[in-house]
Structures are given as C-alpha cells and as structure tokens.
Amino acid sequence: MPASRRSLLIGSLGAAFLAGCGDSDSGTSAGGEAGKLRIGYQRFGGLSLAKARGDAPDATWSLFESGPALTEALKAGAIDIGQTGEAPPIFAAAGKIDFRIVGTSEPVPQGEAVLVKAAKGYKTFADLKGRTVALNKGSNVNWLLVKLLEQSGLTIKDINVKYLKPAEGRPAFDSDQVDAWIIWDPYFALAEQPGVQVLADATGLANNREYILAAPDAVTGKAELIRDFLKKYRATTDWGIANAAERAKILSPELKIDEPTTTRALARSAKPLAPITPAIGDELQAIADGFTKLELIPGSVNIKERVDETFNEAFL
C-alpha cells in the first residue's frame, strides 16, 4: 500500500475511533438493557474477530481509539465489558474508575515497538537522549517507555515526550516532527514501510498482555451473558490462531487494512486468552507501583483488588 494511502487510512481509522461509543445504547440505565451486552472494542484486538464472526449478534458494539478512551466509557456506564492493554486499567484505577479485571491473554511483547527512520542512524533507545518520542498516554506503550528508559539508564527528563493519539502520531512520525514513535499493532504494521526501522520491541521488557475489563454491575447483573460471550470469545481466538489465513481474510475488511499487513500484524500480536490469576494481579501491581514511583499517576493504586476470577472457567 503506498505511503500516502496508508497515511490517509490512519487518519480515517482515527476518525472512526474518535466516535467512541457512538453506537452505545442511549436512554437506558447505567447497566443498559438487562438482556443485552454492551461491548467496547478496539480495532485489531481479539474482540474485532469476535465481532466479525458474529459471536454476540444481539450485543451493542462500541469502537474506541485506545484503552484510555474505553475505560472512560466504563466510567460513564456506556459499556459492560471491553479489552485494553496493561497500562489503561492502572491509569483508570488512578482516576477512580470502578471496574473488574476478568480475563487476560498470553504475553504479546512483539506487538508493540519503537519505530524510527533508518536514515537517522539510531542504534539503541539510548541514542534518543534529547530527542522527541511520541506515544499515546496511558496506553500499553506507556509502560514500555518506562522499561526502555530503565534499560537504557535514562530518565523521562532525558527525552522530550510528546503524547499523541495514534491518528496524530503517524503523521507526526512521517513528517519528522518526532524522532521516534512507540506504537502497537495494527498501527505498528501499517507504519512498517521502506526506511522505517524497528529500534526495539517489548521482548524482555514488558508482557503487553490483553486485559478484559468489566463494569461491576455487569459482573453481577449480566454474569451469564458475560460468561457465555467469553466462552465464544476464547473459542474464536483459538480458531483464529489455528486458521491464520482465514482469520486475515475475515479481519482485513473489518479493519480496512490489506491482507498482507493484517497477516503480518496478527502473526505476532494474536495470542490465546487466559484466566486471571493472583500472579497476574502481582504483575499488574508491579506496573502500577512503577508508574507511582515515576509520578506518572497520582498516588498509589491497589490494582490487585480489581482482579476477579468469576469467569475463569470460560478460559479453560
């Protein structure tokens, strides 16, 4: 796909994301209709495949640009369940948003990366000292930045951080307004063009798991709907991993991304779902404590108390 077309695609995807929960129910209570599940999803995440395959035909699906936008919908009572990366739940908890963490995935470290222009000659993240680095604040890549700084012996004051949403980050990167862009799939895959170098991914630094969040009133009031959906979601995820070519054909039109790019991104970023456990809670708590130490969130957050094993059987 030509660079100009890809840039336009990023813009159009971003515009769609900014619509947020435009498809959500209106005029209902905070929990929505009792017999209807309201699902928040991001393009490319595992829920996109579940939506494309019709796993919840009676549900209301709401599209979000990023995890932080999705957690705001939980705060507003606009969705019952949704999926994010590892940092959004922590920023949401710091913002006093109430939710439960009801599921996760196997690690996806190759699904997020630091992109630079090869012509600039950067070899390691440490070479970005004094340079401008773009990322989406509160998203999974925020934790990757923390770990990259730690690994490189830098502090956040050693770089110029520019917080940009994905639809803003791509044109800024393309036009050299920033020196590096920390981003996740499918934006990552879309940006992989001649002249673009992957400086580092999250391997050995961050697990970059998917997390499934649910509104507390939905956990109690829509438990059977959630349980049934999660079983279908798990089965669909497993099917997609076992049938990569068919998965790409289904998701390519849903994502509005060409099949080769979709295939490449899915090959590294689509992982099996997994039950939530105390060990996962410990992993998230370590991330939360890291954000607190760096004063990226106000005060401390007990994210472990949000872990809820109610639906673990759906992932087994």
Image (tube, rainbow, N blue to C red):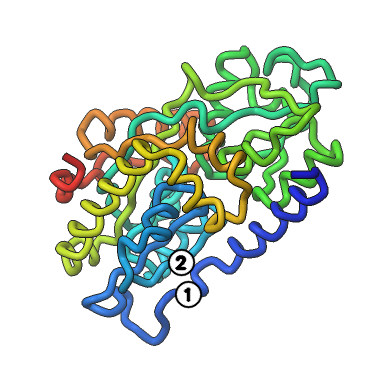
Residue 169, image x and y in percent? 72, 45
Residue 231, image x and y in percent? 21, 51
- Which of 220/109 is in front? 109
Q: Neighbour class for label 2 at 10 Å: few (<14), some, many (≥20)?
A: many
Of the residues under marks 1 and 2, which one precedes in the sequence?
Answer: 1
What is the quadrant of residue 219 in the picture? bottom left
Residue at 20 percent across and 47 percent down: it is: 308
Describe residue 128's horizontal placement relative to residue 310 as left or right: right
In the current view of this chain or complex, which residue is farthest to the bottom? 27
Q: Neighbour class for label 1 at 10 Å: few (<14), some, many (≥20)?
A: some
Q: Amino acid at mark 1?
A: Asp
What is the quadrant of residue 158 in the picture? top right
Residue at 64 percent across and 22 percent down: it is: 155
Residue at 52 percent across and 32 percent down: it is: 111
Residue 18, image x and y in percent? 61, 64
The answer to whether marks 1 and 2 mark residues whose Cβ atoms lie closer than 8 Å is yes
Structural distance between the alpha carbons of marks 1 and 2: 5 Å
From the image, tell me which residue sits under label 1: 23
From the image, tell me which residue sits under label 2: 62
Q: Amino acid at mark 2?
A: Ser
From this view, report whether residue 296 is shown above or below residue 204.
Answer: below
- Which of 307/229 is in front? 229
Describe residue 98's horizontal placement relative to residue 26 as left or right: left
Kindly state the secondary structure of the residue where label 1 is placed: loop
From this view, report whether residue 52 is shown above or below residue 124.
Answer: below
